[in-house]
Image (cartoon, rainbow, N blue to C red):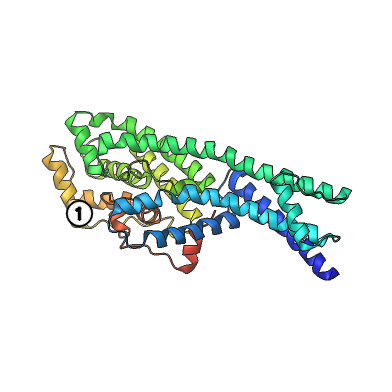
Amino acid sequence: MIALRILALVVGVVMIAGTVGSAVRTVVLPRGVQARITRYVFLAMRMLFRLRMGRAPTYEKRDRIMALYAPLSLLMVLVAWITLTLTGYIGVFWGMGGRALREAFYLSGSAIVTLGFQHAGNLLGTAVVLTEAALGLVLLALLITYLPSLYNAFSRREAAVTSLEVRAGSPPSGVQMLERFWIVDRLDKLDELWVTWEQWFVDIEESHTSFPALVFFRSPQPDHSWVTAAGAVLDAASLILSSVDRPDTPEPQYMIRAGYLALRRVADFFGIPYDPDPPSDDPITIARDEFDEVYDRLAAAGIPVKERNQAWKDFAGWRVNYDVVLVALAGLTMAPYAMWSSDRSLSTWRPGFLQRLALGRF
């Protein structure tokens, strides 16, 4: 019995330490690192939501269901932290001796909810009770302070996504953005837009790796998505550089680099494989005939275009940098239909079992 109590004490301490470590990695540490408890909670919740979604006949219905996934999963993380802390302290109180398992449960429950309906009875027990009460309050406070930071980042992201509808339509596309800018005679003003979206991608890289749950927060409008918005802007810049006959400027090139680096950082966190230095002639998910249709649209709109074959080679050379990660993230987030983005997700990267586990990595 003594050995069993010692084992319960050790296991309890390990559970408490693991919970604290998970909370620190999830909320406090300003970088994307693995937190096993949060990871398993999000993975389990994703499985439940997939069952709930079943074979939903329309995207709108699937979107309504999945809109609750990230918020509810965050709440379940707090439930998991509290439950593990409660269980760990039960093991500690029982392992310290002098009380039955039921009494240890009452004492741990009394401490973690700070109601104080059960007394420890001695100085050492009281000290342990105080640590549990303090830890319960800290865990709750951590999540409460985490939410404003998360929603601030979400608000910044969605402001740009919503404003893109004015310039690139809904669903957004790179070719529609160029057509609209050309119609209002502002093609020369695009460099200002590239600078804005370069800053947006920098923010995405920082926020979506520091707060990985943010990746799964869906836009207020079902036809909006941060992934498809990123794809539309990147495609527009790639088309400008490859197909539109105008002097090259550095702004779209910097923006594309900021974009694919941001998407790759997010992909790294979720274990999505990609070639970090792909050759310019690597295949992409855009077929030549699809590019030709867009090329013809640009020419029909009166936009001056470069030689067709060279334009295709140059476009593929830019797109290859973000093609795989863009499509994979569209599939991971169940993004709505958008030209050259989410419509690729069913025919490309499919995670294996270990990578499916990695998709819940937090």
Depth order, front residue of 116/155: 116
Q: Does residue 106 appear left or right of residue 149 in this picture?
A: right
Q: Is residue 178 visible from the viewing direction of this image?
A: yes
* Residue at (30, 63) in percent of width and height: 347
Measured along the vertical axis of the image, is residue 197 above or below residue 210? above
Residue under label 1, please give it.
290
How many discs appear?
1
Q: On the image, which quarter does residue 175 sit in? A: top left
Q: Residues within 10 Å of mark 1 (few under 14, many from 20)?
A: few
Q: Of helix, strand and loop, which one carries label 1?
A: helix
Q: Is residue 250 visible from the viewing direction of this image?
A: no
Q: In x, y percent, where is residue 206?
A: 50, 42
Q: Amino acid at mark 1?
A: Glu
Q: Quadrant of the N terminus?
A: bottom right
Q: In x, y percent, where is residue 358?
A: 50, 60
Q: Residue furthest right?
A: 123
Q: In x, y percent, where is residue 28?
A: 62, 43
Depth order, front residue of 351/252: 351
Depth order, front residue of 335/282: 335
Q: Does residue 250 appear left or right of residue 145 in this picture?
A: left
Q: Does residue 293 appear left or right of residue 258 in this picture?
A: left
Q: In x, y percent, where is residue 163?
A: 32, 34
* Residue at (65, 45) in percent of width and height: 139
* Residue at (17, 32) in percent of width and height: 183
